[in-house]
Amino acid sequence: MEWRHTNSPVRVKAKRTISTRKVMATVFWDRHGVLLVEFMQQGTIINAAAYCSTQTKLRRAIQNKRRGLLTSGVLLLHDNARPHSAINTQNLIRSFGWEQIEHPPYFPDLAPSDFHLFRYLKEFLGGKRFDTANEVKEEVQDWLSSQAADVYDLGIQKLVERNDKCLRCLTSCGDIF
């Protein structure tokens, strides 16, 4: 809203164009590389049932790609979004025998996918135009598989520093939160 004189010319608004469709991916990775990339179908949402299905696929991917890891222990970090913290999801993760790292509230960018991996992926995809969702998926898959293992290892190492920084902030700024 704005105040105008009754004789003022009508302001012309630019019409928004419909943006291209988005492609949503869930990526699980460890210090050695990508374990699972799952692209969501257009028009679907991530709820607890969908996330549990993805967790089951992740377990299968770990069995295939990291032999022995399931018996030595899986430590899972994901944020506290509703599908991740739902009772069904938590029960499934416990049934797998996986341990979870507590994700501090108010720090949604603590996940290494957000501050490390996806930042570089966004830079790589920036300015590129794709005609189909499949082209995007192929480009993302190719980029993820082209990254050296030390890129993933560095992301995990940075997680420790970032987590410590968040904990220091929580203790020094505890009254704010």
Image (cartoon, rainbow, N blue to C red):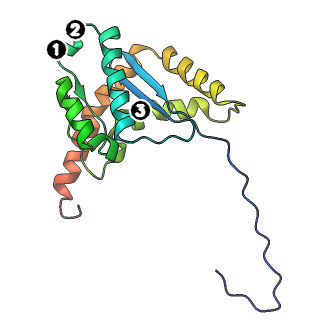
What residue sits right under mark 1 in the picture?
72
Q: Marks 2 and 1: in contact by CB < 8 Å? A: yes
Q: Position of residue 88 (x, y in %)?
A: 25, 38
Checking the image for residue 114, the label placed there is none
What residue sits right under mark 2 in the picture?
68
Nearest the viewer among 160 and 63 is: 63
Q: Residues within 10 Å of mark 3 (few under 14, many from 20)?
A: some
CA gap between label 1 and label 2 equals 6 Å
Q: The residue under label 3 is which amino acid type?
A: His
Q: Position of residue 145 (x, y in %)?
A: 49, 15
Q: Earlier in the sequence, mark 1 or mark 3?
A: 1
Q: Position of residue 102 (x, y in %)?
A: 20, 40
Is 72 placed above or below 38 here? Answer: above
CA gap between label 3 and label 2 equals 27 Å
Relative to 15, 29 lies left or right: left
SS category of the residue bearing label 2 = loop
